[in-house]
Image: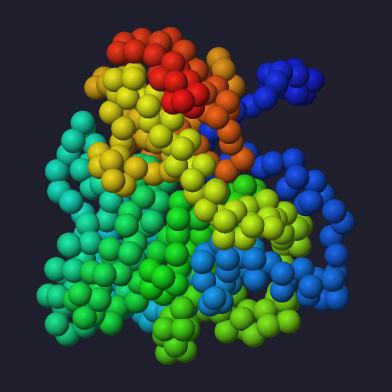
Amino acid sequence: MPALSTILNAHPTGHHFLQIPGPSPVPDRILRAMSLPTIDHRGPEFGVLGLKLLKGIQQIFQTTQPVVIYPASGTGAWEAALANVCSPGDHLLMYETGHFASLWERLAKRLGLKTEFLALQGTEHGVPTSWRRGVQADMIEARLKADTSHSIHAVCVVHNETSTGVTSDIAAVRRAIDAAKHPALLLVDTISGLACADYQHDAWGVDVTVSGSQKGLMLPPGISFNAVSQKALEASKKATLPKAFWAWDEIIEMNKTGYYPYTPNTNLLYGLHEALNMILGKDGKAGLAATFARHQRWAAGVRSAVNAWGLSIQCGDASVYSPVLTGVITPEGVDADAVRKIIYERFDCSLGTGLGKVKGRMFRMGHLGDSNELTLIAMVVACEMGMKLGGIKLAGSGVHAAMDYFSA
Ligand SMILES: Cc1ncc(COP(=O)(O)O)c(C=O)c1O
């Protein structure tokens, strides 16, 4: 065991490039806001803060319906969504876009729900085809049409699949449910899509939207959300899965005056207040639109680099490229994690690992939240140098392609 002084002095100088697709870097403004003294969560100031947050967060979800804020990671909000609207043995139609969709399906099974997991069959570049495409709304429509007894209780899909870099068309899933004239609820995970990619809880007819703090909202992990439709609220009154801490009814009741039935995570909520100011500012909807536009531009710049390297993007359908992250498939025989290790150790840049079925086959470049063009170019530089050190033969310079894109 080395001496403590050796460990503490081992931090490299300069800036660490946290380029994983969440947690994303937390801006100084938010860190400072969170450093304010903790207040009485039953006192008058807290009620003012609580009401302001609940109003602001509705704008981010583009909803006028209740948004429940939990002191929990995203996994908690997944469980909350299911625990509130389901009864033991309820049948869920889920869709395999990647690792996070798979984890949600596993969680549903652990809650005693019956899951049916739709997926595209086959493999491409040694990775499952279903992990390179968005949700296939026509498959959902066909399955719901076949369910003439309406035994399927809910359809669950991931909007931005963080393990692959694919952003599915949620409005198309809504249309599929409507076309099948099926009463199933629509539950959507946009844990990594919120405040990066356009997301419209009301307009897309979503019943429960699940999200978290540590991605587009630029906060540390520890807050998560359920945006809830009236139909979901009605369903929650009849649902019989055990729920106590996650139960919407008591929280929504106390939220009317800005308070919570338990001790909320006050300092993270200060951070959320600052994040809402940063994203919505005085501009509100326009601030949100500018956030989406900047993520699209960053993503296109990063993809131009991957294309110049001659490597395959994990997302195999250009119409569903994620504005949040880009997955890069390494050439056959190259361990993507070994390359990531070089990039981390030599250049102090963290990239996302390949998860689950794509472990070792790809790495993920995050371009979200408190980022800018120069930070992203630095990430591209780190990847290019690391891949060369790792023995990957690149077709051309991604760095120059990204510079050309961002300076055009
Ligand atoms: C799409 C998606 N769903 C769910 C989760 C799980 O959230 P958490 O790790 O905050 O519990 C994540 C985490 O990265 C995610 O990206």
Residue 74 appears in view: no
Q: Position of residue 224 (x, y in %)?
A: 57, 61
Q: Position of residue 143 (x, y in %)?
A: 16, 69
Based on the displayed image, in which of its 4 quarters is residue 401 positioned? top left
Q: Position of residue 376 (x, y in %)?
A: 53, 28
Pick the residue in front: 403 or 313.
Answer: 403
Residue at x-position 45% and y-position 68%: 201
Q: Quadrant of the N terminus?
A: top right
Q: Looking at the image, is 395 positioned above or below residue 126? A: above
Q: Position of residue 352 (x, y in %)?
A: 46, 35
Is residue 6 found left or right of 178 in the rendered image?
A: right
Residue at x-position 87% and y-position 56%: 37
Is residue 12 found left or right of 288 in the rendered image?
A: right
Residue 14 appears in view: yes
Residue at x-position 58% and y-position 33%: 372
Based on the displayed image, in which of its 4 quarters is residue 309 positioned? top left
Residue at x-position 14% and y-position 75%: 145
Is residue 264 found left or right of 168 in the rendered image?
A: right
Is residue 336 found left or right of 219 in the rendered image?
A: left
Pick the residue in front: 405 or 392.
Answer: 405
